[in-house]
Image (cartoon, helix red, strand yellow):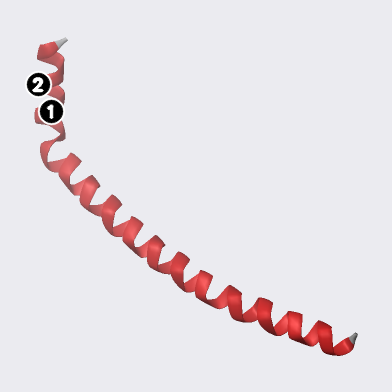
Amino acid sequence: MENIKTVLEDTTTNKAAPKEKDFQLQSQEYNAFMNTLASVVEKHGAELLKELDCVV
């Protein structure tokens, strides 16, 4: 029974590490996307709001 517990612990710790790396990579990609989106909104947001206001 002790052998089974150590094998289970080893497999769970090995599987958790790649998920954290994937999450960090996705988080970095998300942050880059949000920064790009924010810069576009800052640059062109006023123009878009004026055009939308004219349409309505």
Quadrant assignment, res 2: bottom right
- Residue 28, position as x, y percentages in the image: 35, 64
Residue sticking out furthest to the right: 1
The residue located at (29%, 50%) in the rendering is 34
- Residue 8, position as x, y percentages in the image: 75, 80
Q: Tell me the kind of residue under disc 1.
A: Leu
Against 21, is 47 above or below? above
Against 48, is 3 above or below? below
The reply to whether callout 2 and callout 1 are in contact (CB within 8 Å) is: yes
- Residue 40, position as x, y percentages in the image: 16, 44
Quarter holding the C terminus is: top left
The residue located at (39%, 68%) in the rendering is 25
Characterize the local packing of mark 2: few (<14), some (14-19) or many (20 or more) Cα atoms within 10 angstroms.
Answer: few
Kindly identify which residue carries mark 1.
48
The residue located at (18%, 48%) in the rendering is 39
Residue sticking out furthest to the top: 56
Q: Tell me the kind of residue under disc 2.
A: Glu
45 left or right of 31 in image? left
CA separation in Å, label 2 and label 1:
5 Å
Q: Tag count in the figure?
A: 2
Against 36, is 46 above or below? above
* Label annotation for residue 51: 2
